Image (cartoon, rainbow, N blue to C red):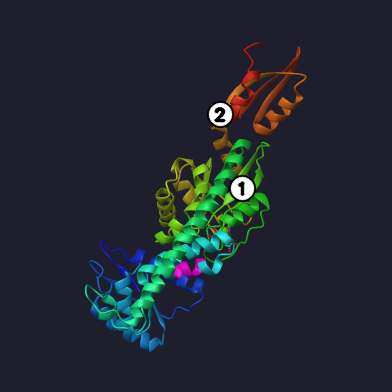
Amino acid sequence: MGVSFPPHDDDATDDSLDELALLVDTAGADVVGRLTQRRPAPDPATYVGRGKVEEILERAEELDCDTVVFDDELSPAQQANLERLLGRSAIDRTAVILDIFAQNAHSQEGVAQVQLAMFRYRLPRLRGRGRSLSQQAGGIGARRGPGETQLEIDRRRITRQIHKLTADLRAVARTRATQRKARGRSALRHVVVVGYTNAGKSTLLNRLTDAGVLVEDRLFATLDATTRRLELPGGETILCTDTVGFVRKLPHQLVEAFRGTLEVVHEADVVLHVVDGSAVDPDGCIAAVREVLTSIGADLDEELLVFNKSDLGPGAARQAADHPGSVAISAATGEGIDELLRRIGDRLRALTQPVELFVPYARGDVIAALHRSGEVLSERAGEGGITVSARLDERVAGRFAEFAAESRS
Ligand SMILES: Nc1nc2c(ncn2[C@@H]2O[C@H](COP(=O)(O)OP(=O)(O)OP(=O)(O)O)[C@@H](O)[C@H]2O)c(=O)[nH]1
Ligand SMILES: [Mg+2]
């Protein structure tokens, strides 16, 4: 069930419903029908209008369906009312996405993040089954039934779980921050791959690094960040990380819960934003991804747009032409990958500074360190040592300050 609000964009409502159908299918249910409605605003009690509720009920009986999925998040009251009026499950897009995440979570952290998001979603929706609304409403001076006591127990239990999961995830984030600091010392540049779900992020990481990350034609195949080393054509070693995919109307509970995993974006030197160039509405996907990135405080300056799936048609190339500075690739066939690596190299080079160093012959270790930490442009053997011209990261240049050549030559 999709509802369009002003300014009415029926195409957008349709696209969103297509995507919802894909989400429902990924979650493991069969879609048997769809309905739409135009409304000035959501009905506070039932989200759709009362007449529409009747129509949904009729269709649901006719199609013998057991669940009605609404394309926007329902308030706890709307959901309760709809379930009562329709006599079957009424769920929203958020619940479907949470369900898929739950099915795909494997790592301890992934499972904890999804659980946290689910508990946060469920807490305000807790209610005893089969009791009338007036009984649930409680209110001042209302007599407490046995059901409400159970409800309170459930509420307390879930609140406790939320606290525990939040603490666990914080501990994981701390460990990661420590690891990150250690990596920072090694001064490797970091490319982080982000993008809409199913855009081809994992395929790209595999193409670049033999990471062996699971690739699937289903939504949210990846929930955990995977980091691999990658050698650029210039010989520089960098880190490359694959991340969880995004979707339109991504539940805020999930964004919140996955904040720890997504923090990796903050330390990115380049954010590779992978877009499915063959998608119906690539710009809509780009906007949805940028919205999430902005909401977690990521800097969009580091973004490098990559239009993937150029092998599927002219879409990717056309999009790339429309977005200056972007690249069209096919992660599947390897087309455009060389150009992409060149672009990444250029971006990273822009973060370095040219230096001229004089290294005594006895310090072969310094020459080796220079090759490891930056790009050595030339080495000239002279009296007492080697004059090296190189490009170094601002972060490591200081380490070699004592060898700075005082324009001797
Ligand atoms: N034709 C074609 N298919 C591709 C290309 N890149 C990825 N795919 C397919 O697109 C689907 C999704 O690829 P993934 O790499 O799993 O996408 P993802 O962005 O990691 O998706 P999530 O982890 O689910 O968010 C798979 O069926 C891939 O085989 C490409 O360049 N061309
Ligand atoms: Mg993936």
Q: What stretch is highlighted in magenta?
A: 96-101
Is 164 a magenta residue? no
Q: Main secondary structure of the magenta part?
A: helix
- Nearer to the camera, 388 or 227: 227
Inspect the image, locate mark 1, and give the three-letter code of the amino acid beneath it. Answer: Ile
Q: Characterize the local packing of mark 2: few (<14), some (14-19) or many (20 or more) Cα atoms within 10 angstroms.
A: few
Q: In which quarter of the image is ligand 2?
A: bottom right
Q: Is residue 227 above or below residue 44?
A: above
Question: Number of numbered discs present?
Answer: 2
Can residue 247 be seen here? no
Q: In this view, does 102 lie above or below 228?
A: below
Q: Name the residue under label 1.
A: 337
Answer with left or right where residue 263 lies relative to residue 406.
Answer: left
Task: Quadrant for the N terminus, please.
Answer: bottom left
Q: Where is residue 179 in the image (x, y as percent from the top left)?
A: 60, 45
Residue underneath mark 2: 394
Q: Which of marks 1 and 2 is nearer the N terminus?
A: 1
The amino acid pointed to by label 2 is Glu
